Image (cartoon, grey):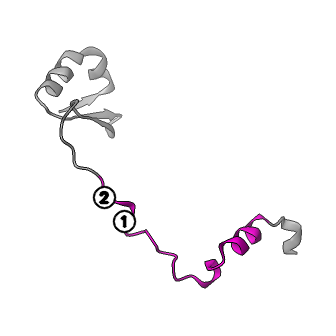
Amino acid sequence: MKATILDLRRQMSQVLKSLDHNEPVTILHRGKKKAVLYPAGAARSQPGAATDHPAFGMWKKRADLSDVGRHVRRLRKGRHNAI
């Protein structure tokens, strides 16, 4: 079911009935998806591990980041040292 903010205010009984039927409710604000409500106890798909994300380890081959302490000190230097 899709419900707007106005539906939540005026037709909460229908939203609750959908949740009773184990149907997720998508909350819309100005036509854009803002949230999804799931019934309590409903089985949901679990997100994968962070290491499975394509962005994980994208900087592991950068030579300038091999010494993390040196890199952080360089980032924290004031602007007057850069001149």
- Say left or right for 13 vs 68: left
- Residue at position x 33%, y 40% from top? 32
Query: The N terminus lies in which quarter of the figure?
Result: top left
Please give the label number shown on residue 48.
2
Above or below, 40 relative to 60:
above
**Residue 56, quarter of picture:** bottom left
51 with respect to 13 (left or right): right
**Tag 2 near tag 1, CB within 8 Å:** yes
Q: Residue 59: horizontal and vertical position, in percent?
A: 52, 76
Determine if the magenta segment contains residue 34: no
Residue 21 x, y percent position in the rendering: 10, 28
Q: Is residue 24 above or below residue 66?
A: above
Which residue position holds label 1?
Answer: 53
Q: CA distance from mark 2 to mark 1?
A: 8 Å
In the foreground, 15 or 64: 64
Q: Nearer the viewer, residue 67 or 14?
A: 67
Q: Which residues are magenta?
A: 47-76
* Residue type, numbered disc 1: His
Which one is earlier in the sequence, the residue at label 2 or at label 1? 2
Point out the image quarter for the C terminus.
bottom right
Q: Badge 1, how many Cα within 10 Å: few under 14, some, many 20+? A: few
Q: Residue at x 47, y 74 (%)?
A: 58
In percent of the image, x 38 and y 66: which residue is there? 51
What amino acid is labelled 2 in the image?
Answer: Gly
